């Protein structure tokens, strides 16, 4: 025989389970709703001009003894410094390296006794923001080699852009806007709307030569690029 107390207890338990089921079901619906998101990327690019130039001029003389070579190196160095000043390079932007003396090995002299016994070399470096002056000087290196009677043996030039910090905020904002536009398009195609940002990450700033995936140090023109990856919530 069923007692009224047992019936009441069963009804209370059943009611509790029903309420619990309601909240669990509602929670699952919320989870599914908030878990709907789209992952998009936004791109921002800027074409810029290099703001820093580095020019290396290599000098070297050879002879039978260092004491005979040092005056030649000194004269070549003097001519190079005068040339750079004439091209508009400031004295504070020029650095003269230490002289390096190398003795020809005994084996090399045995193979070719006509070789000079010593070679003395150095590097004169220029670091400047005057891109035009650097370009002008670099174009005239061959003339300088003739003027120094071969004392200038070669040169290297590179250009870089150091102004990323000034572009950072603007470019990140542009990349994020580009990502949102992609998310809006995706949401429209799927019959949804874009909600708040769920997660976002910023890629590193890349500096390359225009139209290339890598940097060309000798190119004055540069391309600055940043990509942001953003997860946007989707809602009905």
Image: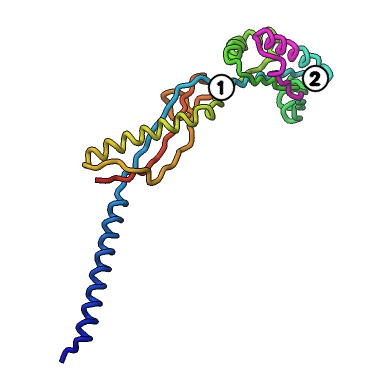
Along the line of sight, the residue nearer the viewer: 7 or 56: 7
**Quarter holding residue 185:** top left
Give the label, 2 or 1, closer to the camera. 1
Q: What residue is rendered at 45% in x and 39% in y?
A: 202
Q: Residue 90: say if magenta.
A: yes
Q: Which residue is mark 1?
A: 159
On the image, the x and y values in percent for residue 104 come to 75, 27
Along the line of sight, the residue nearer the viewer: 38 or 52: 38
Bounds of the magenta segment: 76-99
Q: Residue 212: say if magenta.
A: no
Question: Disc 2 vs disc 1: Cβ atoms closer than 8 Å?
Answer: no
Q: What residue is rendered at 31% in x and 38% in y?
A: 183
Q: Residue furthest left?
A: 1
162 sits left or right of 171 in the view = right
For residue 177, above or below residue 61: below
In which quadrant is the N terminus drawn? bottom left
**Quarter holding residue 107:** top right
* Tag shown at residue 228: none
Spatial CA distance of label 2 from label 1 is: 39 Å
Along the line of sight, the residue nearer the viewer: 94 or 97: 94
Along the line of sight, the residue nearer the viewer: 14 or 43: 14
Task: Indicate the secondary structure of the residue bearing disc 2.
Answer: loop
Marks 2 and 1, the one that precedes in the sequence: 2
152 sits left or right of 222 in the view = right
Q: What residue is rendered at 22% in x and 38% in y?
A: 189
Q: Residues within 10 Å of mark 2 (few under 14, many from 20)?
A: some
**Quarter holding residue 172:** top left
On the image, the x and y values in percent for residue 61 come to 74, 17
Q: Residue furthest bottom?
A: 1
For residue 41, above or below residue 140: below
Q: Which residue is mark 2?
A: 64
Task: Indicate the secondary structure of the residue bearing disc 1.
Answer: strand
């Amino acid at each position: 025989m069923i007692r009224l107390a047992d019936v009441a207890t069963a009804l209370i338990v059943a009611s509790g389970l029903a309420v619990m089921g309601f909240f669990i079901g509602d929670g699952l619906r919320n989870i599914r709703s908030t878990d709907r998101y789209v992952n998009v990327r936004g791109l921002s690019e800027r074409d810029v001009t290099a703001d820093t130039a580095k020019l290396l001029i290599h000098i070297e003389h050879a002879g039978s003894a260092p004491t005979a070579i040092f005056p030649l190196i000194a004269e070549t160095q003097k001519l190079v410094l005068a040339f750079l000043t004439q091209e508009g390079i400031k004295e504070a932007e020029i650095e003269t390296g230490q002289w390096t003396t190398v003795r020809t090995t005994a084996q090399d002299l045995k193979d070719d006794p006509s070789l000079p016994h010593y070679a003395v070399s150095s590097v004169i470096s220029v670091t400047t923001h005057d891109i035009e002056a650097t370009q002008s000087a670099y174009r005239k290196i061959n003339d300088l080699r003739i003027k120094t009677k071969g004392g200038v043996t070669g040169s290297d030039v590179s250009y870089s852009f150091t102004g990323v910090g000034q572009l950072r905020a603007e470019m990140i904002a542009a990349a994020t806007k580009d990502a949102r536009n992609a998310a809006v398009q995706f949401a429209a195609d799927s019959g949804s709307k874009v909600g708040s940002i769920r997660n976002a990450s910023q890629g590193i700033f890349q500096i390359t030569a225009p139209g290339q995936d890598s940097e060309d140090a000798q190119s004055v023109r540069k391309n600055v690029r940043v990509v942001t990856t953003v997860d946007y919530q989707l809602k009905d």
